[in-house]
Image: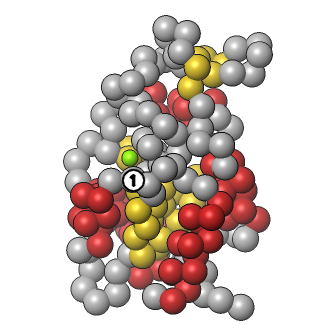
Amino acid sequence: MCKKPGLVVFDLDYTLWPFWVDTHVDPPFQKNSDGLIRDRNGQTVKLYPEVPAVLEQLHKEGIPIAAASRTGEIRGATQLLDLFGLKHYFSHTEIYPGSKVTHFQRLCQQTRTPLSQMLFFDDESRNIYDVSKLGTWRCVTCVLVPNGMNLALLSHGLEAFARS
Ligand SMILES: [Mg+2]
C-alpha cells in the first residue's frame, strides 16, 4: 500500500469554489427551498463540481482534512463551508489574512502532524512558494490548482505525496 498523507490542506477561493468570497460575492448567504445557495444579492454560488467527491474520497480513506485561507471574509467563508454541507469534513480551519506560513505553523501545532506528512492544494503560486519554503529538508507536498479542485488533481497529489 502506498504512503498516505497525515493531513490534506485545501485553500478555499478558486480551489474549492470559483470566486473570492471577499470580493465577487456578497455575504451573508442563504440556502433556498430550491437547494441553491445565494448571496445577499440573490447571486447563486456553487462549488467546483467534483469538490464533494474529492472530500468524500479522503474521508473514506480516513485522511484528515483542513482548510487554510487568507480571506478577510472569515464569517462568509465559514458559512459557505456549512451551507455546502462540507463542514464535517474539516478537522481544522485556519481562515484569516496573512501569510500561509502562519496557517501551516498553527496546523502543525494543533494537529501534531509534521510538515512532511502534509499535502497542500492552492490556486496561487505565491502561497505554494511560501509554504514550500517551510521546514528544512522534509517539507509540505504542494500542488498548484489551475482550474479548481477535481478528482484527477487529487490523484495526482496523492501520487506526488507517495513519491515524496
Ligand atoms: Mg485561492
Vertical placement of residue 39 versus 76, above or below = above
Left or right: 102 as drawn, with respect to 107: left
Mark 1 and ligand 1: say if the CB distance to the nearest ligand atom is below 8 Å: yes
Residue lying at 71% horizontally and 91% vertically, measured from the top left: 1
Percent position (x, y) of residue 120? 44, 65
Residue lying at 49% horizontally and 8% vertically, measured from the top left: 41
| Residue 3 in sight in this render | yes
Percent position (x, y) of residue 48? 59, 42
Vertical placement of residue 85 versus 154, above or below = above
Which residue position is annotated with label 1? Answer: 123
Left or right: 28 as drawn, with respect to 91: left
Total marks placed: 1
User: Where on the picture, by quarter, is residue 55?
Assistant: bottom right
Percent position (x, y) of residue 134? 26, 74
Residue lying at 48% horizontally and 71% vertically, measured from the top left: 119
Vertical placement of residue 35 versus 124, above or below = above
Task: Please tell me how crowded label 1 is: few (under 14), some (14-19), or many (20+) other residues with Cα within 10 Å.
Answer: many
The residue under label 1 is which amino acid type?
Asp
Q: Nearer the viewer, residue 150 or 139?
A: 150
Percent position (x, y) of residue 68? 41, 52
**Extreme residue toward the top, this view:** 41
User: Where on the picture, by quarter, is residue 20?
Assistant: top left
Vertical placement of residue 23 versus 142, above or below = above
Left or right: 56 as drawn, with respect to 132: right
Element type where label 1 sits in the image: loop
